[in-house]
Image (cartoon, helix red, strand yellow):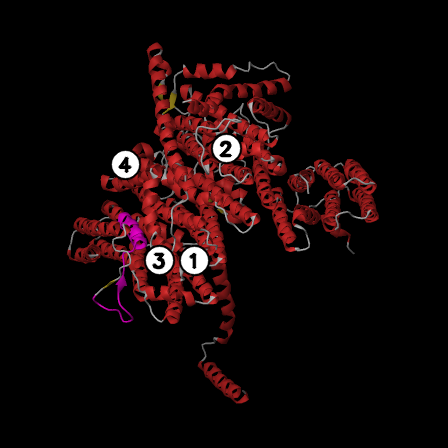
Amino acid sequence: MTSLQNMLLIVVLITDLTMAANSRLGTCINITAIQGFALGFLPLAIGLEKGMNFELVAIAVIGIALRGILFPYILHRSLLNSGTSRELKPIVGYFLSVAIVLVLIFASLWISIRIDFIAPQLLLLSTVALSTIFAGTFFIVGRRLAIMQILGYILLENGIYCMGLAFVQDIPMIVELGVLFDAIVAVFVMSVATNKIHEEFEHFDIQKLDSLKG
Amino acid sequence: MNDILAKLLPLVVALVFAPLAMGIIQKVKAFFAGRKGFPVFQMYRDLYKLMHKGIVYSRSTTWVFRLAPLLVLAVSLIAVAWLPLGGLRGLFSFQGGFIFVAYLFGLARFATLLASLDTASAFEGMGANREALFAILAEPATLLAFAALILTSGNSSLWGAISWGQESSFAEFGVVPLLALVSFFILALSENSRIPVDDPTTHLELTMIHEVMILDNSGPDLAYIEYASALKVWFYLVLMANIITAIFSISGWAQILAMFGFAFLLAGIIGVVESSIARLRMKKVPDFIGSAVAFALLALVLEGIL
Amino acid sequence: MMLFGIGIGVLVGGGLLTLVLKKSAGINKLGMASVVAGNVFVIVAALLGLSGRYAGEVYQFFLPLPVGAVLFSLSPLSSFFLLIIAVVTGLAAVYAPKYLAHYGEMPWRFKAHWLLYNLLAASMMLVVTAQNAVFFMLAWEGMSLSSFFLVLFQNERTKVRRAGWIYLVFTHVGAACLLVMFALLAQVSGSFDFDAMRAAAAGFSPGLKAAIFVLALVGFGMKAGFFPMYVWLPEAHPAAPSHVSAVMSGVMIKTAIYGIVLTLGLLGGGQGTELWMGWTLVVLGLVSGIFGIAFAAVQQNAKRLLAYSSVENIGIIATGLGVWFIGMASSNEVLARLGLMAALLHTVNHALFKSLLFMGAGALQLATETLDLDRMGGLLKKMPRSGLAIIAGAVAISGLPPFNGFVGEFLLYSSVFAQGFGSSLVRAVYVIAILGGLSIIGALAVFTFTKLVGTSLLGEPRTDHAAHAHEVPASMYVPMLVLAGLCLFIGLFPLPVMSALKLVLADSGLAVVGQLPSGIVSSLAAMQWVAFALIGLIGVFALVRSRVLSLHKVENTSRHKVGSTTWDCGYHNPTPRMQYTASSFAQPLASFAQPLYSPHRDGSIGPDLFPAPVARKISFPDLILDRAIKPMYSWISRAFETFSIIQHGNTHWYVLYIVIALLAVLFWSFVI
């Protein structure tokens, strides 16, 4: 791993942390966009080290277009529709959230050391991957609003992508595209669902969804 | 003899330029507020003026109140004397020097807190309380950030860490110093009572911390405290400038110039930050300082991995 | 050696002699004189022992014990602890008579007090010199019992009796663990003598070592006050007379530290330790430190606050011991030496400043007739000398330079620069633990002790008692000033103290050899100069200030003013009740860490349109005692209450139970 790749991975790690600290939904969406850009540039950084090829460039371009631009755009739109701008009462408080994400980072580091087929130079990559997955799951669990759940899902997907990079240095393009299209469909469906929830109930606090059960 | 003079240079530079840095922050803030602002050299005049005024001591106060300004200034002086300035070594440097200096700042804080409680004023008690509370997060952030910086280089003193950047490729570990830098920037804002933690221009409103603690100081005492806080701002500016020059491996005469450049640039950035974001609610301040701890912790963990 | 014997003899004899006197004043004087005289002998013996004069020699008292002989030695390690005990008990004894006098004329109680006090001092001295497990346990029990009765000095008060019981229970659970530990050791080595145990240590199995370590940790931890076992400290210290709290917190809990050091020796030093033991101690120490000081920060009772802060300081010492264990287990000499030195130095430091602060709390109590910080204020003007000593103690205990507390913590901090951790990641974890833990402790200590000093000594008096307080007699503030001076001395001249500590490290029982790393020595030397520079600069600035002021006094006298009111943002009639109190100082911290404290609020601020007088009280239930042990016991007692249905009070039924039980036993024995 070169310092450029490290730098990009650290950006991903820091975005995980700042997500935990932020209450403004718009900012959180922008943070995931930054994370998407960092992850999008990662194949290019790998290409600089190992020789550029078409697949890497394509993955980078598609990744940046979707993770960095399209997803945030869709989410910003559904946020505009909803009229909510911040999550005021998360299930887990912000200070505690940062602490939890830090603990998750430590835990992923520990797990990465334990997985013996991860080469030492890929330790950071797999740590970042695992902690992003964990952080994504944490946001799904620890936040009330549906938008944050979608963001958590995107983080989860980003983490899986990183994990793929850690296990197999260059992911076959078709696999990566498959994962990405899954994500597109998911984000679309979820944002449509969010809008619907909002239209029906004037809010999208998922904690109140239990009133639907028959 | 030349050696000693060279070692004294960082101190002399700090003594001369610290008020100027404060002036630059003021000027930037004034610019963003659409005002002309007072001259950048205003603080020198203020200090001169204060030194020629009398002191009013409250009936409630004791010798503690009179000792505190002296101690605070002495500590700031020692801190800037220790800090290397680019290629210039500080007056003293030893293994674990950063711990000593952090604890000296702690001593100054102790004295300020006691002095403000000595006045028996509710306002100053409140400021003291908040200062003591936020220090609980600021102290570990300071030490962890220093440790990340110093241990990455395999050295045991700040001077070693900074000059190490000249020889070896600091860029290889660029991430760790960068994270430490972010941590120090947050600390520079919180420890020097700048926005978004505190507002240095007012002691009213609900967010008073540092300024309210020195409400009762006047004349030369106030001059000492103001000068000391200017030196403390300078301390953080030079510290961050040191890290930046080390990251970019700038050396020689360019380093000295770069030091000044970066220090004043950072002063400008502080001014921009102060003009562009709002003060945080009191309950949010621990989150802000806590993020400095988070960055420092991250830096240390990465130092362990990389 | 004769000197030591004479010293113990004078202590015990003096204690007994007080029984014949009739007048309180005479009893107090004689008690004090006997402690001081005895301790002078012991101090001389300890100084000789520290220099290695008696190294390797074991002495036998002519009267034997039921099991084994009375063996003791004055090795450098024992002498080191002996010296601390003698100095602190001596100074506390000087402090005691005038303090006791305020209780009034109670000859019998004073007689009992001095007898027990002298026995406490003597038994502590025997604990740290004993070389035989049975003798050690006898001295240990003597120490526990005499301190228990000393805590009960004001036994007519329910709170004091309750505190005494809690202390007695905890100390005996600990003693039980120690008995098992020594029994195990004696069984394996075939003797109760420590030398025989050391000799047999090489053959101990890892399981046995682990068992002994855990037993020692729990047994000595109960006395020392490690994190979940500290419960008796905040109860017993406020209940005891102040000089007794000073001795108990300053030195008695240190005998447990001696015990842990001794245990490592009994385990065979470097070969006996394992890495997990070290990490356990480090984690336990840091957790004790953070919890102790976090709870100290919110206390309103001065002595309760100090008791919690003892938990913190014991935690720092335990961290040092843990670093020593880690160093021994990984044969990392630098780490081992730094850890042990830090632990021992902090032991001295804490003995000095904690006994100083307890005496100070006693002085404040005499002056204001309360320990509640919210009822004090402005006392520095009334009590300049004891106030000065308390401020010095507060700076020292907050670990700030140029006082002694900083030196010990600096040694611990310096261990992060040591090389030779397994991997860089382990080192990162170590650095985070030590730097993060100690700096949080340090910042919380600043919070706690600015609160203590700020609300008691500074500002304006909050009650009439505080407004009419007087300085305590010289026999009370002189010991405090002496202790403050010692704190400053160690802080300003750490190197001579370090070389004295090197003599202790040379003790054969510790298996630590060699010099301190040169980096540390030069650091300490440099810090010494900077500390002098700091004092010099303060002097210069003070001169400049007075010069400037006197210059313009000529021009315009009216501008320099002493004695105006505090500038309260224009409010010109501030009252003392408007000041920040200890409770209000603690409130933001308590609300920030709500789950930790779960503050209990009594009374409320009414919603009425027209304000009426309201009373509101906040208390902070102890994490372990009030929120773990008490609920557990009430649960157990409720669980057993279900059995009360079989308790009828009807004899016929009871006979039936007996018959059923007999039949059941018979049936069972036939079936099996």
Q: Residue B252 in the image: x percent, y percent?
A: 56, 24
Foreground of the two, B137 or B305? B305
Distance from disc 4 to disc 3, alpha carbons, whole Å, reads 50 Å
Q: In the figure, residue B116 lies in which quadrant?
A: top left
Q: Secondary structure at mark 4?
A: loop
Going from N to C along the chain, the mark reached first, 3 or 1, is 1
Amino acid at dot 1:
Gly
Going from N to C along the chain, the mark reached first, 4 or 3, is 4
* Residue bearing the label numbered 1: C270
- Return the residue found at the far bottom: C670
* Residue bearing the label numbered 4: C470
- Return the residue found at the far top: C555
The numbered mark at residue C509 is: 3
Contact (Cβ within 8 Å) of mark 1 with mark 2:
no
The subunit carrying tag 3 is C
The numbered mark at residue B159 is: 2
Q: Secondary structure at mark 1?
A: helix
